[in-house]
Amino acid sequence: MTFKRKSFLILFFVSSMAILSQGIAKVDPFEVTLRKKSKEYKNEVNFVKAFLFYNQKKWDSTLIYSMKQLSANKNRELANYCRFFRGKSFLNLDLFKQAKRELHLVSKDFEFYLLANNHLGKVLIESREFKEALSIFKEIESLGDNVPSYIDKCLLYSDIGTCYLFLNDFDNSEKYFLTAIKLAEKGNDDKVLMSLYQNIANVYYEQYKDNKAIPYFEKAYQLSKRVDDFSCKEFSAKNMAVVEQNRNNFEKALEYRKEYDQWKDSLNNQNKIWETAQIEKKFAIKQKQKEVNLLATENKLREAERNSLLFSSGLLLVILGAGFYFYRQKVKSNKIILEQKMILDDLNATKDKLFSIVSHDLRSSVNALKTSNSKLQTSLSSKNYEALDVQLNTNNAIANGAYNLLDNLLNWALLQTQQSFFYQESAHLQSIVKQVVFNYEPLMLNKGISFQSNVAAPIFVFVDTDSFKIILRNLLDNAIKFCSENGNISVYTRPSDDHFCYLVVEDSGLGMTETKRQELLAPTVLLSKKGKEEGVGTGLGMQLCKSLIDKNGGTFAIETKLNQGTKMIIGLPLAIKL
């Protein structure tokens, strides 16, 4: 019985191909849509040719022009149609691996995606991937009444039955084949019905249900007489020969075997004719392929020329862009160099002026001290104690001025070379003011100046203590220097709503003009002399104050009017209480 089962399974597989071929020959809505698309895209010559050859079942030509269309145009809709053409062409040429690849490339938004999937299932059957094929067919069947009209339900049920048979699920296979037979019997397609009779007969024969199988084999044999396909007649006669042989009716089996040989010879003759046609077709394809290769070579040459032109143009643009960029960079660099040169010129001018003023002030101070000492010696010799007291006070004032000048010069130099130690911390404002004022009380007393301090006790500022003392010393020194005899100096804080504390150093001196006030506040490194009856100042102390205030994150302002005194106002950041 092993021989019997093997023989009929082979015959069943061939009869499945007969159903496939019949399905291909059937006209359906897909072909109607294809005709509309060929008119809609009439300018796409390769697509139109691929459609015409597909309609004529010239599969090799279909493959050539569908590939040309895919190479020449990226239209998604046309690409899906061409992938379908190629998948079906490969299927009919028994190139199942290639057919499977092309049908997998059809996207899900394709209008006839279900049809492409249905053909993919047929490819999987031919590749003996029955589980995968069954999954595809069952998904289509699950649509029920929504299965599109371009999918033949009779062939769909037949394909599902085929998968179940090769998976040895005979119950389901029988169920789907019988359903397909009922649909086929309503039509007039003898070839499809004959193939289905053979399929259901094989289902029964595989289960050794000969009493059910033989009537279907006989029905298939009777229908084969009405079919023009020699292969169907051949396999129907062979099936009956095997059946009669297994029933030990050797005489009848011999008759069927002779009939089988007769149809086989006719089929061979037909195959020879077909082979001759195939040779002619292959020759024609080779000729066309030569033309295609020639066109491809010409296209490559054109593409190479175009790419060369594009590359040259791109390179020229890059060179021009690089030239423009470097030109801009050069202009920018020259501008920066010019600005730096101007700054250096200003710094050199400042340096020269600084040395000139400082050397002049130091020379004046030393000369004044020398003259005063001569007078001091004279007063000592004559024992003129009143003059001696005056000369000592003068010497003290000259020494203090020279000391302050040198101290400011040292601090300014350290600040400019970034060598000064700087550390901001929380500091008690009132205590720092008291420490600085203490050193200046003798000077104010000697000049008869009345001093008053109203710094609020609870204020803590966030400053570098040493630099803040330098600022305060310079402001007090200026206030004493420019305050008249028996004048007033006061240091106090102003209330503020923000995060700053404002410390005011006010004197009742001569004040200054608006021009002088603007000059002192200007952010410049140049120094300026300040005229006064008692001497000349360098302005170095004010420049030092502004730099140190800025470094502490503070602000500086001046309120003054000529002959109405001056207010120097320092804004200091308050310390944050944690």
Image (cartoon, rainbow, N blue to C red):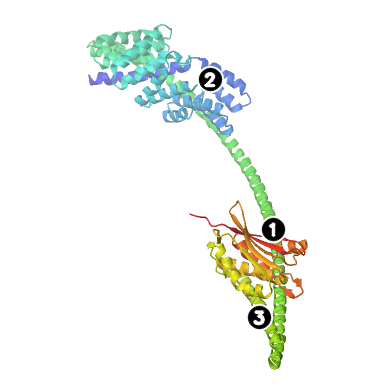
Q: Is residue 334 left or right of residue 284?
A: right
Q: Earlier in the sequence, mark 3 or mark 1?
A: 1
- The residue labelled by disc 3 is 396
**Disc 1 packing (10 Å; few <14; some 14–19; many ≥20):** few
Quick check: 360 above or below 85? below
- The residue labelled by disc 1 is 332
The alpha-carbon separation of the residues under discs 2 and 1 comes to: 70 Å
Quick check: 458 above or below 246? below
Which mark's residue is nearer the viewer, 3 or 1?
A: 3
User: Image point 40% across, 17% down: which residue?
Assistant: 141
Q: Earlier in the sequence, mark 2 or mark 1?
A: 2
Foreground pick, 254 / 349: 349
Foreground pick, 354 / 564: 564
User: Image point 34% across, 8% down: which residue?
Assistant: 219
Circles 3, 1 touching at the beta carbon (< 8 Å): no
Residue 369 in view in this figure? no
For badge 2, the amino acid type reads Asn
Q: Quadrant of residue 258?
A: top left
For badge 1, the amino acid type reads Lys
Residue 433 in view in this figure? yes
- The residue labelled by disc 2 is 55
Q: Position of residue 123 (x, y in %)?
A: 41, 25
The alpha-carbon separation of the residues under discs 2 and 3 comes to: 121 Å
Q: Quadrant of residue 198?
A: top left
Q: Position of residue 216 (x, y in %)?
A: 31, 9
Quick check: 176 above or below 363? above
The alpha-carbon separation of the residues under discs 3 and 1 comes to: 56 Å
For badge 3, the amino acid type reads Asn
